[in-house]
Image (spheres, rainbow, N blue to C red):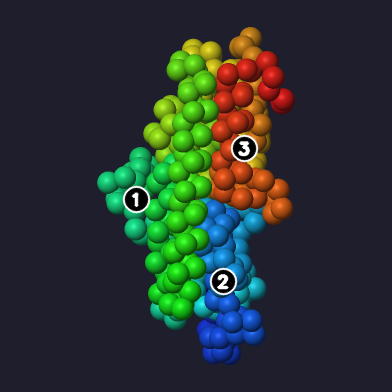
Amino acid sequence: MKRNRWPAVLGTLALVACGATGEGNADDGRLDAVATIGMITDIVGEVGGDRVHVTGLMGPGVDPHLYKVSAGDVRTLSEADVIFYNGLHLEAAMGEVLEEMNARKPTYAVTDGIDRDLLHESLTYAGQYDPHVWFDVRLWRSAVDRVEQALVEQDPDGEAEFRANAATLRDTLDALDAWVRERAAAVPEELRVLITAHDAFEYFGRAYGFEVIGLQGISTASEASTADVQRLVDTVIERRIPAIFVETSIPRRTIEAVQAAVRSRGVDVAIGPPLFSDAMGNPGEPEGRYPGMVRHNVNAIVGALSSPADVAE
């Protein structure tokens, strides 16, 4: 069944492309942009301001590693003026569609402008990089530059507005990065061990001084084994880690298995508040925006590791 999916979706792409006008949001004059994950949608909306209408494909709780486009998504992409995605194989399951779109319209990977020497190399997939760049706020700032450049290319008349909006956003991210560093320093050094359901927080750990251990690998397509669970159990017990974490886009069962195994050996460990990793929170809530998502995660991590007695299961 999986083998037959792509011809069907790409066939839909061909039909939609034949009927597309390429005018996007011509009725209101705004540039029509589509972004894959919420963190990119947020940047495009901030930099684009009133001159851009942005649609995000992946909402709260959606795992981009496993996300496959629907016929409706193909239509949305085909009708856009410009498309933004993360790259670095984050959206691996929709790679063929993005490649097809790139041949038809402006399509930008927001990580293309980041110096590869600053990226974290995958230990699981040789020659590839960890795509979870947004967990280092200072590094994610580079995605703003890429979006700014792309929007100026697509709408030169809006250059002044795009550049002003991008400058404001960069200031916001600089302040956010400073806040994260201050909050992270509140965790005792020996407790700065972040154990999560999948290995998405390496950039966070490198930037803000945490050792990061994931039950699954960088991609959630890989399954955690019994040996993986046992490895984490031993780590929690030996290092007296007060809390472990699960992400909103990952099932709780694997981390709950770690917790149960730790407790079976007479040691208690809490499951901290859910973290946002590959997806943000609900629209209209603070966690539905990138700065709010970062603040939620950092407060959850610092609170659970500094004051484990206050952690709600």
Mark pair 2, 1: CA separation: 32 Å
Q: How many marks?
A: 3
- Residue placed under numbered mark 1 in the picture: 128
Residue that protrudes farthest toward the top in the picture? 266
Residue type marked 3: His
- Residue placed under numbered mark 3 in the picture: 296
Residue at 62 percent of width and 30 percent of height: 300
- Residue placed under numbered mark 2 in the picture: 52
Q: Position of residue 187 (x, y in %)?
A: 52, 20
Residue type marked 2: Val
In the rendered structure, the answer to whether residue 308 lies left or right of residue 211 reads right
The label number, if any, that marks residue 240 in the structure image: none
The foreground one among 304 and 233 is 304
Q: Nearer the viewer, mark 3 or mark 1?
A: 3
Residue type marked 1: Gln
Task: Inspect this view and state whether residue 5 appears.
Answer: no
Residue at 62 percent of width and 37 percent of height: 296
